[in-house]
Amino acid sequence: RHKFWETQPVGQFRDAADLNLPDGAIEPPTPLSEVRADPYPLPAAFEWYTCDLDDDALLADLYALLAHNYVEDDENMFRFNYSPAFLRWALRPPSFFRVWHIGVRAKESKKLVAFISGVPARIRARDDVVRMAEINFLCVHKKLRSKRLAPVLIREVTRRVHQENIWQAAYTAGVVLPTPITTCRYWHRSLNPKKLIDVGFSRLGPRMTMSRTVRLYKLPDAPLTPGFRQMELRDVAAVTRLLRAYLAKFVVAPDFDELDVEHWLLPQEDVVDSYLVESPETHEVTDFCSFYTLPSSVLNNANYATLKAAYSYYNVSTKTPLQQLMNDALIVAKQKNYDVFNALDVMENESFLKELKFGPGDGQLHYYLYNYRVRNGIKPSELGLVLL
Ligand code: NHW
Ligand code: EN5
């Protein structure tokens, strides 16, 4: 049934019930000298193209490939529209490898027709901190679908990851593959209900009018928690301490150091937003919340072209109740003109979703590890990892 995935070191559906298989690597590393030295062959009309994200023209091509061909919802009403600045941020974390930004071009026209990427990360599973690649932005142009190009892209990124002596990877997908470590649900909090209903993202509830709906989702004009402010460069050490202590509670989570926090959490306009609570008395940083910006194109709507969505990222509460902290996150997102605030049921998010009027979406997100078994899988609440 899975001609490609059956050949890969991932949990196979047939082994799911076998409780004797140990946690950890499914197959051992091979000597670097045995890693295939040359790229996998592509159909004759295409060539590999290592992408340079410093190059504005390449970035514009990558942006366009994804804007027209990347992930859509199940009814093809919306398509993710990652911005160029977001792509640069997502693909160039500390110690990134340029050769993991892998394009496929048509030889003749030089048009970019497919892409896959990896970035390095340290991810902890139980007490094992593992160097991994986070794989994302796998995309094949709509006109080239179902020709088995995706397995070639996946094998090629795997080869280039192996060349850096890295043997594990983490990735998410909306489709079921062998075998998720956990399956999360998307939840959505309307900030601009009228627009969401107009574009078909949400519906007027039964026995609800538009004005009652608008009132239901109303939020205060400014955050309520004293000491709530934007994160700054001087906060990196304090935020790293908070986040490391918090992520230690989860079974699978990234192992962030200060360089990672500076990259992934320092605010960048329309890319990532981070706020913290600095105690007005002690000036101690006690709480932290963040979200990233991922608009979606609205397909086939006469009134609107894009939906501005915030996605909950990493949040830590030690003094301010998590629900109050996230309410302030909703308030600043509303101030900044986002239409919707999305969150997964990971970490402790279940504790605020219903109370803050998030509703369950129709999409799921499956989390995977490559060449790493986590026996029986984990619950979404045991997962401390958010991929972009
Ligand atoms: S998930 C988003 C993926 N992208 C999209 O959905 C965009 C729209 N769709 C497309 O562009 C986030 C195409 O439909 C794609 C498939 C390219 C998805 N992951 O070429 P064929 C990520 O980027 C398998 C993995 O004919 P296609 C994470 C499928 O099961 N595999 O299909 C990416 C089948 O294999 P099977 C996927 O529709 C993680 C084969 O591809 C998949 O023209 C990648 C069919 O290929 C998906 N999302 O192109 C894995 N979708 O065995 C990383 C389909 O079932 C692994 N397939 O026959 C780790 C690597 C690094 C390891 C390092 C140690
Ligand atoms: C890798 N980084 O399906 C990502 N989104 O629920 C790749 N639904 O937006 C994998 N269908 O439920 C991504 N509105 C997998 C997700 C792909 C995109 C996707 C879902 C997530 C989504 C919306 C729109 C549905 C449109 C029709 C949805 C309901 C919102 C409503 C608001 C009010 C309270 C109840 C819920």
Image (spheres, grey):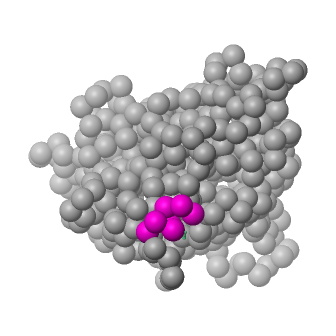
Residue drawn at the location 35% of the way across and 30% of the way down: 52
Residue placed furthest toward the left = 108
Stretch in magenta: 210-216
Asked whether the viewer can see residue 33, the reply is no
Question: Magenta stretch containing residue 289, yes or no?
Answer: no
Across and down, in percent, residue 271 comes to: 48, 36
Across and down, in percent, residue 277 comes to: 75, 31
Question: Magenta stretch containing residue 214, yes or no?
Answer: yes
Across and down, in percent, residue 114 comes to: 31, 52
Residue 314 vs 176, above or below: the answer is above
Residue 150 vs 238, above or below: the answer is below
Q: Nearer the viewer, residue 322 or 93?
A: 322
Q: How many marks?
A: 0
Q: Which of 186 and 159 is in front in this view?
A: 186
Q: Nearer the viewer, residue 129 or 189?
A: 189
Q: Which of 173 and 207 is in front in this view?
A: 207
Asked whether the viewer can see residue 262, the reply is yes
* Side of 40 where 373 appears, left or right: right
Residue drawn at the location 69% of the way across and 16% of the way down: 234
Residue placed furthest toward the top = 234
* Side of 199 where 20 appears, left or right: right
**Magenta-drawn stretch, dominant element (helix, strand or loop):** helix
Residue drawn at the location 36% of the way across and 75% of the way down: 75
* Side of 9 where 282 appears, left or right: right
Residue drawn at the location 82% of the way across and 26% of the way down: 279
